Amino acid sequence: MKLLRRKEGPSLDSRLAALLEAAELAEGRLPEEAVSGARTVAERAGVRRTLSIDHTVAALAGATGSGKSSLYNALAGTDLAAVGVVRPTTSAAQAALWDGEGSGPLLDWLDIPQRHPATSASDLSGLVLLDLPDHDSIQVSHRLEVDRLVELVDLLVWVVDPQKYADAALHDRYLRRLAAHRGVMLVVLNQVDRLPDSAVDRCLRDLRRLLDEDGLAGVPVLAVSARTGAGLAELRALLNDRVAERKSWSTRLAADITTAAARLGAPEEAPAGQAMDRALTAALCEAAGVPLVVEAVAKGHRHRAVVATGWPVTRWIRKLRPDPLRRLRIGTMAPVGGPVGELPAGGSSGKSAASSGQGPGAEVVGRTSVPAASAVQRARVETAIRDVGEAAAADLPGPWAAAVRQAARSRSQELTDAVDRVVATTSAGATRRPRWWRAVNVLQWLVFAAMLAGALWLGGLFGMDYLRLPQPPLPTVGVVPWPTVLLVGGALAGVLIALLSRLAAWAGGRRRARRTARALRTAVGRVGDDLVLAPVRGELDRYARFTEALTRARA
């Protein structure tokens, strides 16, 4: 027959590690009280696991007059705690030990100096029973001592009496807040000897109802009389079962982890990223003057084409006009090594960090002269950054949403210089001269040389005619002399080549402008991704890891 194994959840160690991871990830995002509380729980659990696990520390806690000390003495088999009419009777916690060998370090950690061996039956071997001060004592130090030990003990035994079992101080301050600890909790209705049997049943039913409302369904409720001994056997048997299991300490720690994780928040699935890069890139491109740069690329290409391929007789006039790209200080700054679009680490001082080496697509030093963004353009960039943060934070809890919005703005001050650098770097390639310019330039000078040769030839003939010298034989092309052919043909050919080159330059300028526009959008988008979207993705990834750790801790 095949044996079925029960599927076990994560180990206590893995849950502790997950809780610590969640606390570290929540640092600066969630309230410090919740984060420090999670760390305290993890630290406390780590210490408790190193102490005796053969002993179960149970604490009798209750209000003034509930009979805790009487019940404590009855279980211990001797008068260890003072009992009287003057309240409060118990001023400091004390311990009764059943086979307490090896429990010293545990009691030292609990800071319980008063320790007494129990004299009752030894069926509770391994039990360390504490008698706590009253949780509603008029002495502040007593209440603080109760609060401290309630956070540390393995098993909580709440002692109530028929008159005060519905006290709001008990239910609101302790029981309801400890709903996750129902597995390490007992409730004892003491002093039932003062009531008739019918009244005891009514009290038990009403107490059960109150506990269910507190989220403590299933917590054992016993009717006991420390004075007459009624119900003590059942209480002792229940304590014996809990002590024999040797699991109360781990159950308590598991409940602590669950509670601490709940204070950090409920695990929710991380929201899916939304594409906001297009709007951000468009706003950054407009603010960085990319349309102006693209227009200057087209005009600059035509300008340099005319200078390089124009008719040598008139091209010098074009040189008098400024190059549109040089006016923006693009293509004139000193290059330094680095691939196109790569940003130096840190810094927004307005100058790129210089480094040795050059190469194609190298980064440049200095700032461009692209006009600064207008107020409207800056507002659009800020709006795009805010939209990125809002879209990413839409489905996040409040503190994490605020962290994501802050992440979107965290490096916005670096955008101006970073975008300017990539505009200068990426646009620098637009000043490269096509190879055909050199060929056309050579052709233009050849044509110009032919025209000049024709002019000189005709000048020589004119001079000889003026000096009445005999004319040398004159070759012709048909009826047109060669000097005239060279002069007129060279002039017409030069102008025609210049016009054709200008048409080609106009088309080339448009193509280069389109390529530059695409490259600039890509480079500027990369800046927006590095300085805006990457921090947002990092925060979303942090939240995803926090949620995953929180889920493991709460398992």
Image (cartoon, rainbow, N blue to C red):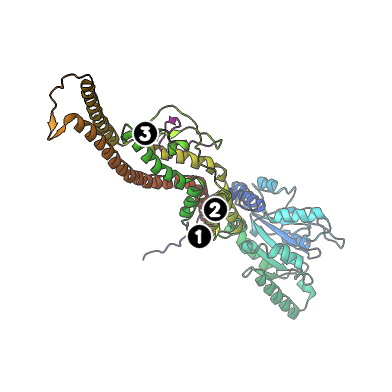
10 Å neighbourhood of mark 2: few (<14), some, or many (≥20)? some
Question: For the residues carrying marks 2 and 1, which lies nearer the camera in this image?
Answer: 2
Q: Residue furthest right?
A: 86
- Helix, strand or loop status at disc 2: helix
> CB of mark 2 within 8 Å of CB of mark 3?
no
Q: CA distance from mark 2 to mark 1?
A: 31 Å
Disc 2 to disc 3, C-alpha distance? 34 Å
The answer to whether 216 appears left or right of 294 in the picture is right
Question: Which numbered dot is residue 532?
Answer: none
Circle nearer the N terminus (2, 3): 3
Give, as a three-letter code, the residue at label 1.
Glu
Image quarter of residue 242: bottom right
Q: According to the image, label 3 marks what residue?
A: 360
Query: Which disc is residue 380 wearing?
Result: 2
**Disc 1 secondary structure class:** loop
Q: Is residue 89 above or below residue 349?
A: below
Q: Looking at the image, tell me whether mark 3 or mark 1 is earlier in sequence order.
A: 1
Which residue range is magenta in the image? 330-346
Residue name at image x 45 percent, y 43 percent = 293
- Residue under pointer 1: 269
Residue situated in front as seen by the camera: 89 or 126: 89
Q: Is residue 333 magenta?
A: yes
